[in-house]
Image: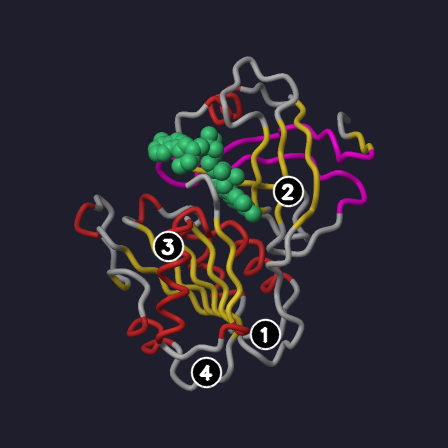
Amino acid sequence: MSEAASENGYSIALTDRRLVAEGTMAFYFEKPAGFVFAPGQFIDLTLPQPSETDTEGDTRAFSIASAPQESTLMLATRLRDTAFKRELQRMPLGSTVRVEGPFGKLVLHADRTRPAVFLAGGIGITPFRSMVVHGAMQKLPQRMFLFYSNRRPEDAPFLEELQTLQRQNPRYTFVGTMTESEKSARGWQGETGYINATLLAKHLANIEKPIYYVVGPPGMVDALRTMLKEARIDESDVRTEKFAGY
Ligand SMILES: Cc1cc2nc3c(=O)[nH]c(=O)nc-3n(C[C@H](O)[C@H](O)[C@H](O)COP(=O)(O)OP(=O)(O)OC[C@H]3O[C@@H](n4cnc5c(N)ncnc54)[C@H](O)[C@@H]3O)c2cc1C
C-alpha cells in the first residue's frame, strides 16, 4: 500500500485509467483510509515529481466523480495537451500522487423534499456523476433531474451509465442533449440543442421548488445562470461551480 496520510493530505496510488469518452479519461486512485467526502466535493491533485512541468504548475483541482460508496477515488478529465495531463496519462499504474481535500460546498441540499436539478456541460458532469450514483446506491428519496449537454454522444463521459441509472432509481430522470448530433457516427434519439428555458420547462412541469446546480466551463455556467435568472428562478435556489482552466 502506498497510501500515506500527512498534515497536507495523502499520497495515493493510481490504480487504473480508462477512456470514458473521446479525448476524455477517468483516473482511478486508491481511496485513503478515513477519507470522507460528500458527493460534489473536489480535491487538489499534485504530481510529486513530474518529468515535465509548465507555467500552470503541478496541481489541478478535480471534482470527485466517484460516489462515497465506491471503493476507489475516480476523477475524469479532458485530455488536453498540457504538461500536467501528458504526465497523468503516461504515469505507470502504481505511481503516487498527492491529494488534498476534500473541498467545496457544491453538495446536495439537506431538504430531501425539494428536487435537485443538475445542469452539466461536458466534463462538468463529474460532481453530478457522484451525486446520482450516490442517490441510486443510497436509495435517496430526493427527486433528481440531470440535464447533460455535449456536442455529440461520443463526447459525453459516462453517457450510458447515466442513462441506465434511471432503471435503478425511479426518482432520477436523465435528459441528454446534443448540440452537434449531426456530426455523430453513433446517432442520437434524445434532445438536441443547448440547455435552455424551453427544454427545462418541457421536463420539469409540475416540479415544485427545485434547487438548481450548474457546473461546467465558465462561459457555460454564466450563460445558464443568466437563463435561470430570466426564468425568474430565485438566485438563492441556484448553486454553481466553474471549472476554471477550461
Ligand atoms: C472546483 C473545480 C473542480 C474542477 N473539476 C474538474 C474536473 O472534474 N475535471 C476536469 O477536467 N477539470 C476540472 N477542473 C478544472 C481543472 O482544475 C483544470 O483547470 C482543467 O482540467 C484544465 O487543466 P489543463 O492542464 O488542461 O490546462 P491548464 O494548463 O490549466 O491551462 C491553462 C490555460 O490554458 C488554456 N488551455 C490549455 N489547454 C488548452 C487547449 N488545448 N485549448 C485551449 N486552451 C487551452 C486554458 O483555457 C487555461 O486558460 C476543476 C476546476 C475547479 C476550480
Q: Nearer the viewer, residue 149 or 186?
A: 149
**Disc 1 marks which amino acid?**
Gln
Give neighbour class at mark 1: few <14, some 14-19, many 20+ (Cα, 10 Å): some
Is tag 1's residue or tag 2's residue first in the polypeptide sequence? 2
Q: What element carries label 1?
A: loop
Q: In which quarter of the image is the N terminus?
A: top right
> Main SS type for the magenta part?
strand
Give the spatial CA distance, label 4 vs label 2: 33 Å
Image coordinates for residue 14, horizontal then vertical, percent: 63, 28
Residue linked to disc 2: 43
Residue linked to disc 1: 142
**Disc 2 marks which amino acid?**
Ile
Give the spatial CA distance, label 3 vs label 2: 22 Å
Mark 3 or mark 1, whichever is nearer to me: 3
Is tag 4's residue or tag 1's residue first in the polypeptide sequence? 1
Q: What element carries label 2?
A: strand
Mark 4 touching mark 2, by CB under 8 A?
no
Image coordinates for residue 118, horizontal then vertical, percent: 47, 64
Residue linked to disc 4: 207
Give the spatial CA distance, label 1 vs label 2: 26 Å
